[in-house]
């Protein structure tokens, strides 16, 4: 029987985090179980019921117990009992805040804690004027995620850095940021999650269209505003070119208004299944990912969509931002611009739209780059070796578990 690993996310599971089940599904010597406090209904990638242990499915007084857990570390006994029944060998939390939230469970279970940092909690700053009350006010009140979670993280960050057994950074950029914020360098390992190259294989029979594709959340750091402004310039030269945007977010209404006032041809498709996204990647000419640094310093870690696009033979126009240059080789597998440089974005998009041979050359280079460094099968083996090391330190021998 394979040893169990708890995959901890507060919410199980946001549609934008397909990379988590992709990684778990490639475990070969461990079995991952998803543990969190809140169930999200999401049809994009339904998780098996027998692999989920979520607090809101253990008690009708979910809001009360979530508050108790978040603020005081008090664990619902049935939730804890179900997790214990897995006999997990470690907890692997994704996102910095989830590392903080997983600390009480790791302590109760007496198992190692691994935390993967992606972007926000390694880069953004927060106004600590919003305090965390010592006692609960309104036990069944919903937690204000936009204020409570960042404040909780920044108050507990130093403790997390001391307590976690292993910190994983999704790019060298994130590792550098974590060190600047006080995380011991010897605790941090850069680990690229990677993508499934078997699923992400282009169908060369499909004729690519003059389509610029964007896939991601419609939020500030994704830089969609600058893409739309750039596309207005592109469509002057290429009125046949269409902008297709896949994803949801707080800026959607504002971006739709901007597009309506400046673009001739565009579509906002909202959230789409992974299969639909792959289909669009197979027929588009270019992926645009013009990420920017947000007002709080919020940056990307390494956008998975860039890796997926390159695996699908889709050249990328992105920015010199965060971990992106670790994946996109400028002028080889794509083009990188300075942040918010709409003229450069437009120029590079036009260059690719008008040069089929260049697109093909970049497609080959992009695929090679992903095969070399970002194959989820190879990279998950490395992650399991890290789990082995932590288990060995804990005194568990995997050979005795089978």
Image (cartoon, rainbow, N blue to C red):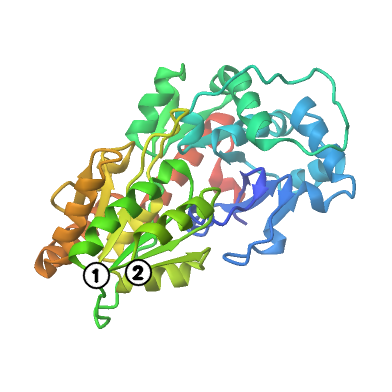
Q: Specify whether 187 is left or right of 344.
A: right
With respect to residue 218, does 350 lie above or below?
Answer: below
Residue 328 sits above or below residue 368 on the image? above
In this rendering, the answer to whether 117 lies above or below 133 is below
Q: How many marks?
A: 2
For the residues labelled 1 and 2, the Cα–Cα distance comes to 8 Å
Q: State which quarter of the image contains the N terminus.
A: bottom right
Q: Residue at (71%, 61%) from the top-left corner?
A: 50
Between 237 and 137, the one lying in front of the other is 237
Towards the viewer: 257 or 340: 257
Residue 65 percent location from the top left of the image: 84, 38
Front residue of 149/261: it is: 261
| Residue 89 coordinates in the image, percent (x, y) | 62, 41
Give the percent coordinates (x, y) of residue 201.
Answer: 32, 70
Whether residue 201 can be seen here: no
SS at mark 2 in the image: loop
Tell me if label 1 and label 2 are in contact, CB under 8 Å.
Answer: yes
122 or 146, which is in the foreground?
146
What is the number of the mark on residue 239?
A: 1
Name the residue that disc number 2 marks: 265
């Amino acid at each position: 029987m394979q040893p169990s690993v708890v995959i901890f996310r507060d919410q199980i599971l946001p549609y934008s985090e397909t990379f988590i089940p992709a990684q778990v599904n490639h475990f070969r010597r461990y079995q991952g179980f998803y543990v969190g406090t809140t169930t999200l209904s999401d049809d994009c990638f339904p998780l098996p019921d027998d692999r989920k242990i979520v607090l809101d499915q253990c008690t009708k007084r979910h809001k009360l117990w979530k508050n108790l857990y978040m603020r005081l570390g008090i664990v619902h006994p049935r939730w804890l009992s179900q997790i214990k029944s897995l006999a997990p060998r470690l907890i692997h939390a994704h996102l910095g805040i989830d590392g903080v939230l997983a600390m009480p469970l790791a302590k109760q279970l007496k198992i190692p804690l691994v935390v993967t940092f992606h972007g926000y909690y390694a880069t953004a700053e927060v106004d600590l004027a919003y305090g965390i009350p010592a006692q609960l006010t309104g036990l069944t009140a919903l937690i204000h995620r936009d204020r409570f979670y960042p404040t909780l993280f920044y108050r507990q960050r130093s403790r997390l850095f001391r307590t976690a057994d292993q910190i994983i950074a999704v790019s060298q950029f994130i590792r550098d940021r974590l060190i600047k914020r006080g995380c011991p360098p010897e605790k941090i390992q850069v680990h690229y999650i990677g993508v499934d190259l078997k699923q992400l294989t282009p169908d060369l029979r499909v004729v690519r269209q003059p389509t610029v594709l964007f896939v991601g959340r419609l939020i500030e750091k994704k830089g969609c505003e600058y893409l739309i402004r750039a596309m207005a310039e592109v469509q002057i030269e290429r009125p046949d070119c269409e902008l297709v945007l896949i994803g949801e977010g707080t800026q959607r209404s504002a971006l739709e208004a901007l597009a309506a006032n400046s673009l001739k041809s565009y579509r906002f498709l909202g959230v789409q299944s992974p299969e639909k996204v792959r289909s669009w990647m197979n027929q588009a000419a270019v992926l645009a990912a013009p990420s920017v640094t947000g007002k709080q310093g919020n940056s990307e870690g390494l956008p998975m969509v860039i890796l997926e696009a390159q695996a699908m033979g889709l050249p990328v126009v992105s920015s010199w931002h965060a971990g992106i240059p670790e994946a996109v080789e400028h002028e080889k597998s794509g083009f990188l611009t300075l942040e918010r440089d709409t003229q450069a974005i437009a120029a590079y998009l036009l260059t690719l739209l008008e040069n089929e041979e260049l697109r093909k050359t970049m497609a080959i280079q992009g695929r090679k780059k992903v095969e070399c460094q970002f194959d989820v099968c190879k990279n998950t083996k490395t992650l399991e070796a890290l789990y082995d090391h932590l288990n060995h330190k804990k005194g568990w021998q995997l050979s005795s578990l089978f």
